[in-house]
Amino acid sequence: MKIAIIGGGLAGLTAAAYLSKNPETEGTVFERSPQLGGRAFTYEKSGFTLNFGAHAVYGFDRHTLQMMEQELQLHFDSKQVDKRKVVYAKNGVLTPAPLDFVNIMKTDVLTVKEKLRFVAEVAAVIGNVHHLKNYATLGEYLDQAHSSEDVKELWEHLVCSNFFITPEDARQVSGEVIAEYYHNLFLSNRPVNYIIGSWSTITNQLADKIRNNRRWDIAVKEAVEAIDYVDGQFRLKTKTREELIFDQVILAMPIQQAGKLLDSTPWADKLAAYNANSCTEVLVYDVGFNHVVARPFHYISDMDHKVFISDVSATDHTVAPAGGQLLQGIAYLNDTFEDEEQKKRYLDERLQQMEALFDTHYPGWREQAEVKRVSKKAMVSSIKNIHSNQLLPVQLPGTPLFFCGDGCEGKGELAERSFSSGRAAAQRILAERLQLHAVAQ
C-alpha cells in the first residue's frame, strides 16, 4: 500500500511514523516548506531558540504524547512549570494564580466565599458531574450560573489561557468541550510541562522513524498542486513531478489549505461546511537577554488586558545561551474588523499593551534585549474550537480521503489534537488494510 501524506507538521509526521512501522506500507511525506514541523518550527538566533509554536504540553501525564512515547519509542525529557511562580495581575496587583488548592487559598482574585464556590466547581468537573457539560457554550452556562462576577471572570480567563482566545470567544466554546478538557487537566499530576529542546526534539525523532524505512521518503520544498482520483488510485502533481500514484492520501494541513487544494475535485462540496471556520491567532513577542533578569515569578498573566509573559527559559534551559533568558509574550486577538485600517489600529494597540506589560515587570528590557521578534498574527490553531466552528473528521464521509491536524477531531486541544488525529488516521488506514486482507483470504 502506497500512501501520500501532504503536510510535514506534527500531525503529518505522526501519521507517517505510525504507518512506516508497517512493513507492507510505503509512501512520501510532502512538505512545501524547506523545513519540517509546520507551525511547530524552531530556529536559532544569536544563541536563542525561537519557537513559532509554544512547546507547552497541558496535562502531560494524560497526553497523547505519553502513548506515542511508548508506541514509537520516542525519547525526550520535559519539565513542569513551577505553579508557585505563576501569578495573575488584576487591577495592577499581582497575586498567585489559583491553579491548585494551595494557590486558590492564597489568591486575591476571589473572596473566601468565592474560593469555596470555585473549589466545589472544580470538584464537580473532576467528578464529571458539573452542569457545564450540558450547556451549548460557556457563555450560556455563565449567564445562568449563580456565581459571582469574579468566579465567572476566572472561568473565562482559564479558557482564554488554555485555548489561546479572547473572553468573547471563550464564551463561545462548547460546555462539553470545556468540561472534558478540564476534567483531564484537573486530574493531571503534571498540568503544564515544556518539552526540553522544543518541538524539534519530537519532530526530529518522528522524521528519523520515517526515514528508517527505506520505502518511505520525505520531500521538503515540494508542494502538492493537484489531486485526481482515477480507477481507485490517487494521482498527485507537484511542482517537480507530473504524476505520482498512491493508494491512500492523508491531508495533514489546515482546512483552509485543504479546501484550496481540493477546490476543483469532486470532493470540494464535502468541505464546504468547513470553509467558514475561523482560526486562532495571537500576537507573539519574544525577547532574549544575555543574562537572567531575576523576578519572583516565571509566568505573569494580565487579566485586565488578556496578555501574558512566560519565562520559557526557566522551564526549558536549552532555549537560551548559558546565563541567558528567553521571555515570550502572548496577546489574545479578536478577528472581527470593519476594514483593514481598524484591524491595523487594533494590532498596534495590542502591541503597545504587550510592551507596557514588559515595561512594568521587566523595566529596562528594551536596552538589555539581545534578541527581539514580533509576530502580530501567529496562527495557534487552524480551527478555533468554538461552538460555531466544526472540527473536521479524520475520515470524511463521501470521500476516499483522510485528514489530520489541529483542525480535526481528536483528543485535547492544539498540539495534542494534531498528535491524536495523526495517530487515528494511521490506525484507520492500517485497520482497513487488515479488513481487506481478511476478505481476500
Image: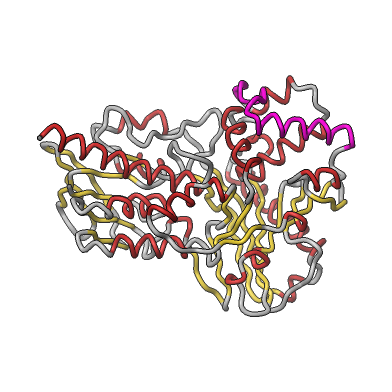
Q: In which quarter of the image is residue 79?
A: bottom right
How many numbered discs, if any? 0
Q: Residue 272 location, x and y as percent?
A: 37, 30
Q: Residue 75 location, x and y as percent?
A: 45, 63
Is residue 215 on the magenta stretch?
A: no
Is residue 125 on the magenta stretch?
A: yes
Q: Residue furthest right?
A: 112
What's the colour scheme? secondary structure
Q: Is residue 138 above or below residue 333?
A: above
Q: Is residue 356 above or below residue 99?
A: below
Q: In this view, does 148 lie above or below 80?
A: above
Predominant SS along the magenta part: helix
Q: Residue 94 location, x and y as percent?
A: 85, 53
Q: Quadrant of residue 363?
A: bottom right
Residue visible at 53% across and 42% down in the picture: 413
Q: Quadrant of residue 287?
A: bottom right
Whether residue 338 is visible here, answered yes or no, is no
* Relative side of 3 to 160, left or right: left
Residue visible at 63% across and 73% down in the picture: 371
* Relative side of 9 to 354, left or right: left
* Relative side of 251 to 378, left or right: left
Residue visible at 55% across and 65% down in the picture: 196
Residue nearest the viewer, comparing 417 with 355: 417
The region drawn magenta spans: 111-136
Whether residue 5 is visible here, answered yes or no, is yes
Name the image quarter holding the C terminus.
top left
Q: Residue 56 location, x and y as percent?
A: 58, 55
Q: Is residue 28 above or below residue 226?
A: below
